[in-house]
Amino acid sequence: MAQFINPFSDWGFKHIFGREISKDLLICFLNDLFAGEFVIKSLAFGNKEQIGLSKDSREVIFDIYCTTDEGKEIIVEMQNRGQEHFIDRALYYTSRVIVNQGIKGEWDYDIRPVYTICFMNFVDPLLPLGKFRTDMVLADRDTGKTVSDKIRMIYLMLPLFEKTEAECETDFERWIFVLKNMNTFERMPFLAKNAVFKKLAEISDLRTLSKKDMDKYEDSIRIMRDAYATYKYAIKTGLEDGRKQGLEEGMAQGMAQGMAQGMAQGMAQGIEKGKAEAEHQKNIEFAKLMLSDGDSTEKIESVK
């Protein structure tokens, strides 16, 4: 039986990464994600409710929103199911954080970098096919040279990460393996590789949760399962409606084609029959004319 929190639930994800007590886990993960680029020494959780552009605008709420010691603003989101405009949605949220940096009065547009990291438990067809990590920046289309580092979108499509426990070579790969499979573990792997996984095991162990936290976690799991059931039902009914509509359209098209073909064949047969009857009547009238002129029956038969 699984022993650890399911990180794909909203409460579970925030319990692992979005609390002060587990802040070092998030710092460790981010440093492994950006390995070789920069090092985050500390971070502060920010207000996840970003006020809209107008008084009547709805608030935008992120899973995790934090600021690093260097001033970089980072959004971390776990998305369990695909959406039609998910890429645009992430871009919109990131842009809102940038816009909220604006200062009234004199301002030279000196903005801080905003990075959005999306854990995706699905494959988005708009992202490169077969690629687990897509890292998007503002860059020149021809040379690939980065023009600005102030906006960055990182998409991690977990279904495309296929390495086994033994095949994981870096801590980042170990992180992804654990997060993808943690709700199935009876034991936490990589405990001897890095102490951070020991703390992760302690924080995410279901047996250590208080009754209050367990109730919240179970509610989160129920919501996740209800959403999945709704998603599956929508697919099923969509397919059934599609088949029904296709059948009805096919029958209507078949009937229309059959009627058109039948009418065409009937008209053609009618024309041919009319021509034959007209020719027959013509022969009768011609025979009558020959008889009136005194021609013999043999002569009339020979002309026909």
Image (cartoon, rainbow, N blue to C red):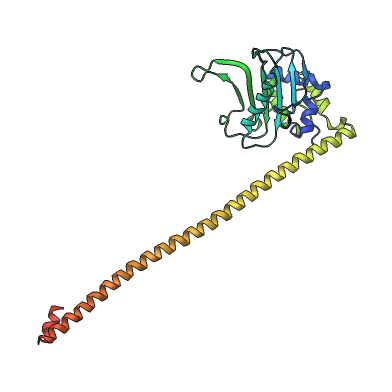
State which quadrant residue 130 falls in: top right
User: 91 and 4: which one is in front?
Assistant: 91
Residue 140 place in picture, x, y as percent: 52, 18
Q: Can you say whether 187 is above or below 244 in the image? A: above
Image location of residue 44, percent across then percent down? 78, 18
Residue found farthest to the right: 211
Q: Position of residue 194 (x, y in %)?
A: 76, 18
Number of marks in the rendered image = 0
Q: Within the image, what quadrant is residue 99 found in?
A: top right
- In this picture, residue 68 sits left or right of residue 286: right
Q: Quadrant of residue 107?
A: top right
**Residue at 57% across / 32% down in the picture?**
126
The residue under the point 87% across, 30% down is 208
Residue 101 x/y as whole percent: 70, 18
Decide which of 167, 130 is in the foreground and name it.
Answer: 130
**Residue closer to the observer: 185 or 282:** 282
Q: Is residue 205 left or right of residue 251?
A: right
Q: Residue at x 20, y 81 (%)?
A: 284
Q: Residue at x 79, y 35 (%)?
A: 2
Visible residue check, residue 73: yes
Q: Tell me the quarter of the image containing the N terminus.
A: top right
Placement of the C terminus among the 4 image quadrants: bottom left
Can residue 168 be seen from the camera position used here?
no
Q: Which residue is outermost to the front?
A: 105
Front residue of 81/158: it is 81
